[in-house]
Image: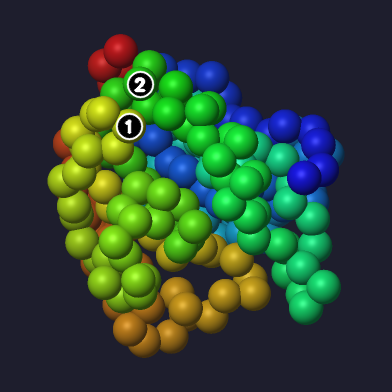
Amino acid sequence: MIGPVVSGTPVMAEVMMIGQAPGDKEGPAGKPFAWTAGKTLFKWYASIGVDEPEFRARAYMAAVCRCFPGKNPKGGDRVPDPTEIAHCAKHLRTEVEILRPALLLPVGKLAITQVLPEVEQLADVIGKQIRTTFHGHTMDVIALPHPSGASTWHRMEPGKSLLQQALTLVAAHPAWKRLQAGIATR
């Protein structure tokens, strides 16, 4: 893994988003989802009423791994290995224990499988709201596909329709509505 550690704004929030790991541009930018995938992700959130600055100020952004894992020789970023995931797991566990989020948004398959390990296919979980317990806290989970430019899943069917279903669920969630309204609950 290649430093620096990248994290979102330390904010007490009832909406928590978990990504895979920062990309190579996030370290120099000093914030998660600061490049191409972020542009797509924040367009999704803007479509349901929360722009990038509002989201960054009102939601907690975490990741499975906190440093850039390096490039994959076949293209794109390398997926963190189980040892790297285990090494960073204490951070995610502590964040969940402190925040006790009402709504968790895992973004991409690696983040989704940390929260919902039984998931095999994105189509099994995207577009659904699932109540689960993660690190001892029960919360609603609405999974999103990874917004990477390398992924076509969210741009073709069934991914395109399932993404819209997921965003509709997020927009209707009471925690999102409070985030959208700028209501601090913590």
The x, y position of residue 104, in whole percent, is 33, 41
Give the side of residue 22 with respect to residue 134, left or right: right
Query: Left of 54 or right of it: where is 72?
Result: right
Q: Residue at x 81, y 36 (%)?
A: 3
Q: CA distance from mark 2 to mark 1?
A: 7 Å
Question: In the displayed structure, would residue 122 be above or below residue 5?
Answer: below
Q: Residue at x 34, y 56 (%)?
A: 117
Dot label at residue 117? none
Residue 138, by quadrant, is top left
- Asked if disc 2 and disc 1 are in contact, CB closer than 8 Å, the reply is yes
Is 170 left, or right, of 27 in this rendering?
A: left
The tally of labels here is: 2
Q: Which residue is most to the bottom? A: 157
Type of the residue with mark 2: Glu
Query: Which colouring convention does the figure follow?
Result: rainbow
- SS at circle 2: helix
Q: Is residue 16 above or below residue 24?
A: above
Q: Three-letter amino acid code at disc 1?
A: His
In depth, the one of 94 and 81 nearer the eye is 81
**Residue 135, labelled with which disc?**
1
Q: Position of residue 20 (x, y in %)?
A: 56, 51
Q: Quadrant of the C terminus?
A: top left
For residue 180, what is the image quadrant?
top left
Residue visible at 46% across and 62% down? Answer: 109
Q: Secondary structure at mark 1?
A: loop
Q: Which comes sooner in the sequence, label 2 or label 1?
A: 2
In the rendered image, which quarter contains the N terminus?
Answer: top right
Residue for badge 2 = 97
The residue lying toward the viewer, choosing from 141 and 48, is 141
> Residue 153, percent across and down?
47, 78
Task: Point out the residue furthest to the front here.
Answer: 83
Q: Is residue 45 visible?
A: no
